[in-house]
Amino acid sequence: MLKTKDFYLLKVYDIRGKYLGVIEDIYIDFNKGRIQGFLISNYLLFNKRNFIKINDIISIEDVIIIKELNKKEGISFKTIKDMDVKDRNNIIKGVLEDIIIEEKDFSIKGLIISSGIFDRIIRGKEILLPKDCILGEDFILYFGSNEVKFQSMPRKKKTC
């Protein structure tokens, strides 16, 4: 499993070995729960072709090797990051902090939300399933059950 921060600033090369730039943002299809592709920042300022579709990726390791560049598709993750997540009762659960991505098919497996610094230290971060969420203009609506919670807890250091 990967997170969005695993992709930022990865170098991008084409199949001929030409350096194209670095990953600047991730574009997603929230309804399908998939990553559409990556936006790269390159040295050509007015180039409209600065988007990598998932299907055009050949290899992802220390660098990304691609077939070709395309035009943007989907929603930028940076535009929805830090968006409020509310439940059915209009109570804020937290803000969207990151997403969990499956390496094999680039599907979104979870949304990581945080409700603040102190809550993050005490209770950890909460993980929501994308199928239980609807993306709105102003917030993300969570309509799942509150009976079962997935959490990312802070680790305690072992003393020897």
Image (tube, helix red, strand yellow):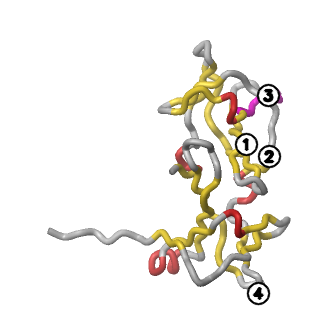
The image quadrant that residue 8 belongs to is: top right
* Front one among 28 and 103: 103
Gap between marks 4 and 1, in whole Å? Answer: 32 Å
Residue 59: mark in rendering: none
Magenta region: which residues? 46-52
For the image, the number of numbered tags is: 4
Gap between marks 4 and 2, in whole Å? Answer: 29 Å
Magenta segment includes 49: yes
Q: Which residue is mark 1?
A: 36
Q: Main secondary structure of the magenta part?
A: loop
Marks 2 & 1, CB-CB < 8 Å contact: yes
- Disc 3 element: loop
> Mark 1, residues whose alpha carbon is within 10 Å: few (<14), some, or many (≥20)?
many
The image quadrant that residue 82 belongs to is: bottom right
> Mark 2, residues whose alpha carbon is within 10 Å: few (<14), some, or many (≥20)?
some
Q: Which residue is mark 2?
A: 74
Gap between marks 2 and 1, in whole Å? Answer: 6 Å
Instruction: Choose the circle earlier in sequence order: 4 or 2.
Output: 2
Marks 4 & 3, CB-CB < 8 Å contact: no
Residue 49: mark in rendering: 3
Instruction: Choose the circle earlier in sequence order: 2 or 1.
Output: 1
